[in-house]
Image (tube, rainbow, N blue to C red):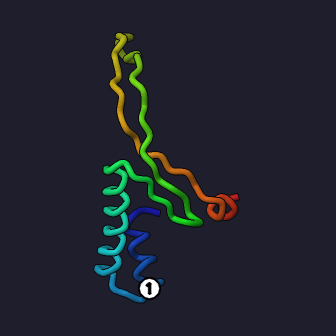
Amino acid sequence: MNKADLVEKVARDANITKKAAARAVDSVFDGISYSLQKGKRVTLVGFGSFEVRRRAPRRARNPRTGTIINVPAKRVPKFRPGSELRKKVR
């Protein structure tokens, strides 16, 4: 399922236009992104939680040339599924 499929499902289930559903989906994604940018955790009960993790700097190798490069530390989003989602996927 991609974003267009999700918008279509929301529009059908909520009995609203696709334009309104697209605004709703975008708003949810923007809210999650904004909270993660601020370093806050986002928890959707029954679905899962999003949080920002810090990756330590490391040394890596360019597979094409074999050159060692330094990869700087960075922050990455992490998703942890909730128990209800895990049960549905099994």
Image position, residue 19 (x, y; %)? 28, 79
To which residue does mark 1 refer? 14
Give the residue displayed 36% in from the left and 70% down from the top. 25
When the figure is inspected, residue 36 is found, relative to residue 21, above or below; the finding is above
Image position, residue 90 (x, y; %)? 71, 58
Give the residue displayed 56% in from the left and 63% down from the top. 47
Q: Quadrant of residue 62?
A: top left
Indicate the secondary structure of the residue bearing disc 1: helix
Q: 61 or 76, which is in the foreground?
A: 76
Image position, residue 76 (x, y; %)? 40, 40
For residue 79, side relative to residue 59 (left or right): right
Image position, residue 77 (x, y; %)? 42, 45
Number of disc labels: 1
Q: Amino acid at mark 1?
A: Ala
Q: 48 or 63, which is in the foreground?
A: 48
Give the residue displayed 66% in from the left and 58% down from the top. 86
Q: Quadrant of residue 18?
A: bottom left
For residue 33, side relative to residue 88 (left or right): left
Q: Furthest residue to the bottom? A: 15
Graded by Cα atoms within 10 Å as few (under 14), some (14 to 19) or many (20 or more), the crowding at tag 1 reads: few
